[in-house]
Image (cartoon, rainbow, N blue to C red):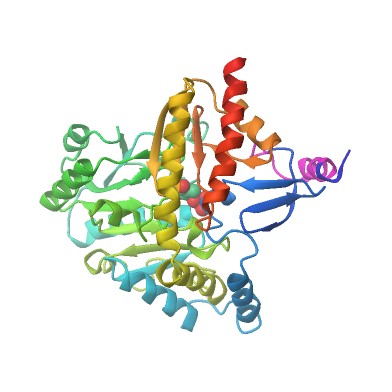
Amino acid sequence: MNNTEKLAERGSKVIMNTYSRFPIAFDHGEGMYVWDMDGKKYLDFVAGIAVNSLGYSNPKLGKKIAEQSMKLIHVSNLYYTEPQIELAEMLCENSCFDKVFFCNSGAETIESALKIARKYAAMKGKSGRTIITMEKSFHGRTYGAVTATGQDKYHKGLDPLLPDIKHVPFNDFEAIEKAADDSVCAILMEPIQGEGGIIPAKKEYLQKVRKLCDEKDIVLLFDEVQCGVGRTGYLFAYQAYGVEPDGACFAKGLAGGVPIGAFMAKDKLAQAFKQGDHASTFGGNPFATSCGTVVMHELLDGGLLDNVKKQGELLSKRLIELKQKHSIIKEARGFGLIQGIELTIPAGDVIADCINNGLLLVGAGANVIRFVPALIVTEKEINEAMDILDKALFRAEEK
Ligand SMILES: *Cc1c(COP(=O)(O)O)cnc(C)c1O
């Protein structure tokens, strides 16, 4: 057994069996590459599932982590700290939102969104408490977030779930219009469904949903945990569509790999949370938020957004070329650095072949391969990844 296999075996004895893991153990990374315990090098198009926005071993992030950890890591939200305020200002000044609630993960931002939506209805004296979410959506694994998630496989054996959550088909305005009766207080959706298979919303659909919510005073919430914070080539995914939600959830890439979540809202909605209504011990600690300021700086002043737009176009072009070449590719979808290809066969074998050949990829549902590399990816690395994938697709077709 090599070192990687040995560690995988040790891990399987003590780590709860909730993940189907690859038998790979990583040791260190740099830029777009990561090395296993035996020195095998991988080009990473997973980025910790859309988390490592600045790649591995980013010097600016490393320096900030070293400095901030020797100043303050945590003091609680009984007090103010400069990194928390600075990140909140950067987020608010560059978005349509007025206020931030910081937490530590995507699921926690969803809990914040679900709670504030019902609080808002209560504040307005509305009786309806139903929240509409989408089929094929993914919102996380806490009880509220998993109930909001519109995929049965995540609900098995968990009953009873949170009451009054209703799932409707995504990108289907008639379905949402029909469901949006007086019992409904909020609609929650991903502008680009991630886990469900990289499915972008249609622009007219989001525009119509926005109008419906305005007419009925329904709170519109976007889950941008995966597609937000630069991944679309826009700072926030809603900006790519020109449709403003009342509140939105951000997490994954926001602090370059350090756990963080940010639920943001316009004042109208934010005021539904009063003192004592919601909290998080670790949320917004100076350590995580200082890392968030480094990522935001790179996006706003470091040219990173332009890189995402440019490399996203190249990735689209290369994926469309692959589709023309390989009949097992049914569709290429997405934009920026959140893209996917749907295959006519299960994606697992193609992904495994790519991993064997030094390219990390992850699926999104059974038949979709997802591409969510670090936002620093270059043309050379996209071409390298596409060449490995091209060969794997040929081998899959020969079978
Ligand atoms: C990953 C994800 C979540 C859950 O985030 P966690 O940090 O795992 O709790 C929620 N929504 C979307 C769209 C996600 O991709």
What percent of the width, then of the height, locates residue 247? 30, 59
Q: Which residue is most to the top?
A: 399
Of 331 and 102, nearer the camera is 331
| Residue 251 visible to the viewer | yes
Q: Is residue 121 magenta?
A: no
Q: Tell me: 229 left or right of 119.
A: right
Q: Tell me: 273 left or right of 197.
A: left
Q: Which quarter of the figure is the N terminus placed in?
A: top right
What percent of the width, then of the height, locates residue 193? 39, 41
Question: Does 161 sit above or below residue 78?
Answer: above
| Residue 110 visible to the viewer | no
Magenta residues (range): 5-21
Of 383 and 198, nearer the camera is 383
Q: Which residue is most to the left?
A: 215
Q: Is residue 20 magenta?
A: yes
Q: Tell me: 54 left or right of 40.
A: left
State which quadrant residue 168 falls in.
top left
User: At 59% across and 76% down in the image, what residue appears?
Assistant: 64
State which quadrant residue 196 falls in.
top left
Of 195 and 399, nearer the camera is 399
Q: Which quarter of the figure is the C terminus placed in?
A: top right
What percent of the width, then of the height, locates residue 322? 48, 30
Q: Tell me: 384 left or right of 335.
A: right
Question: Does 226 sit above or below residue 274?
Answer: above
User: At 49% across and 69% down in the image, what residue appears?
Assistant: 292
User: At 68% across and 40% down in the image, what residue appears?
Assistant: 358
